[in-house]
Image: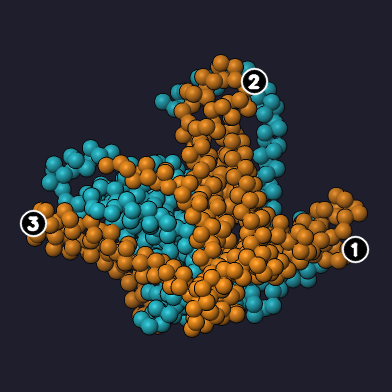
Amino acid sequence: MKSVKTVTVRSMRAPSNLVRFLRQSPLHVVLIAICLLWMVPTLGLFVSSLRPRPLILSTGWWNAFSTPFRFTLENYVHVIQRANMGRSFFNSLMISIPATVMPILIAAFAAYAFSWMRFPGRDTLFLMIIGLLVVPLQMTLIPILRLFNRLGLTGSFAGVWIAHTAYGLPFAIYLLRNFIGGIPEDIFESAFLDGASHFQILYRIVLPVSVPAIASLAIFQFMWVWNDLLVALIYLGGTPQVAPMTVTISNLVNSYGGGWEFLTSAAFISMVLPLVVFFSLQKYFVSGILAGSIKG
Amino acid sequence: MILSSLVLVFVAVICVPVGLTGYLFFTEKLLSRLKPFRQKTLRPWFWVGPALLFLTLFLLYPVVNTVVLSLMNENSTEFVGLSNYLRIFTEPEMLFVLRNNALWLVFFTLVTITFGLLIAVLTDRVKYESVAKAFIFLPMAISFVAAGVIWKFMYEYKPKGAPQIGTINAVLTSIFPGFEPQAWLFNPGINNWALIIVGIWMWTGFSMVILSASIKNIPKEIIEAARIDGARELQVFIRITLPLIKPTLVVVTTTLIINVLKIFDIVYVMTNGILKTEVIANRMYKEMFNFLNFGMAGALAVLLLVAIIPVMLMNIKRFGQVGGRK
């Protein structure tokens, strides 16, 4: 249906593609200029990370495109060999995966109850949870750290999973509540008539239907945890055995006294996985975020 | 070593989801033995239980704890009433922190929304939409550590005459020959703006993605009808697009305000709050871990919470509507 419509629209006003393109040229110029503006900082970092140290410090990165071309991978080799990168990559994954799954599942249970069960104080409770969205993370560091010390969770992955779960829950509940609350009531009624339990409805109907919202939530949470430095630094301490990428890289940055050749390559290494996740799941991201922010 | 790693993978990838599902499965098993009436009153609490447990222990309790701390002295041994709060609003050093947060709040939010909307509208009309959006959104995907490195490199300063390796100084000196290279992050007149720009660079993608989705949600028939009636593009935008995406604009603005009030990482990574760039969250961190003044840190944290309350009130009606169904 959509394609038919665009075809008719196009044939209606297609005296010439060139005329249309020219008429729109200010639009293209502005848009491309903005895109370039947005890309330049990252591009500069990337190009610099591939240049030999003396050149980074003496000339601007844009000179790399004039002859003689001198690119090198030695900054990357150096950073990867010296630092505990393989282990850190593994650690980052082991932190990020459960810290993404836990809040989403727990939030799904709660969001289901908030949408489709009746209990006293339900709406007040939901509003209070929304209110927790505003709690600055820094506010919780000391009380939680004291609690973890008492429970022996400091320096363990479980502690970080728990902390990230708590930090991610208010937003996850808010988003999923909006999405799950928007699922048509008929679906639930017919499922109940067929004798399905709440458990079955959640796992057979609600979760599959909510895939767009869950996917967007998962991307958010995963990137948030992957990119986090503060939480890992405080609850894990500086032990290399459990350090994720961000901690290792920031240590590296400090120990080299901020030499641009290592800073640039280390920063770029830390960006690789989030960028892959973002580009491969972009479609989900947009459709999910739409559901979360516009419904209700 | 390898064995413990395998155990870790097993726990992290399999035990966590299976365990949580198992929790629900077994509580449902238990519930099904009760009378239907009991089931109905008890079940919701088992479903929201895990969430409530986490939120109470790791968010609510720390907040209450912090409020109490904010009324105590540095090492929480003596009750001092509101004197910490008084200090925030009287000491010049603290007033600077508040001013900086206000700067962030106003300019970061306004520019991020405006750019996001502009780009959303523009990309809606071109064929390379997804590529353009990916460019703008990319900064959202990277860590503050990486963004900090990127922008320190952009703002890099060399004295006048030396070849500039920082992009911004290089561009400006080559366009305007008389331009004096600036130490963007160290000049107290401009360093706050330099930091706010980094924030805008990172967050514009967020507002763009949401606003663009909202614009696409407008039925094409309405727009086409207006165009056939002779409305110009600007009129279509002001009279049709804007009113229809208003709820989304409110959501994006609220999210941005909440995030900008808590802004921490950009300042922490780039200047660590020196030279009058400190914001509330950074000051709080410093009071906590450098000065060990838990009373002051608590007061600043409470102040942040209080600042966010009006934003929440603005949105409560919306949430109320959501909560009101069924």
Residue B44: x and y, percent?
A: 23, 56
**Mark seen at residue B161:** 1
User: Which of label 3 and label 1 is nearer to you?
Assistant: 3
**Can residue B127 be seen at all in this image of the molecule?**
no
* Helix, strand or loop under label 1: loop
Which comes before the other along the chain, label 3 or label 1? 3
Are the two marked residues, 1 and 2, in contact with CB atoms closer than 8 angstroms?
Answer: no
Q: Residues within 10 Å of mark 3 (few under 14, many from 20)?
A: few
> Which type of secondary structure does the marked residue at label 2 adopt?
loop
Which shade is chain A?
A: cyan
Could you tell me how far apart the alpha carbons at marks 3 and 1 are, in whole angstroms?
85 Å
Disc 1 crowd, CA 10 A, few/some/many (<14, 14-19, 20+): few
Can you identify the residue that label 2 sits on? A16
Chain label for disc 3: B
Tell me which amino acid carries mark 2. Ser
Q: Which subunit holds the residue at mark 1?
A: B
Which dot marks residue B35? 3
A176 relative to B232 in the view: left or right: left
Q: Name the residue nearer the viewer: B157 or A130.
A: A130
Quadrant in which the N terminus of chain A is drawn: top left
- Residue A28 is situated, as x and y percent measured from the top left of the image, at 67, 35
Write down the colour of chain B: orange
Three-letter amino acid code at the position of disc 1: Gly
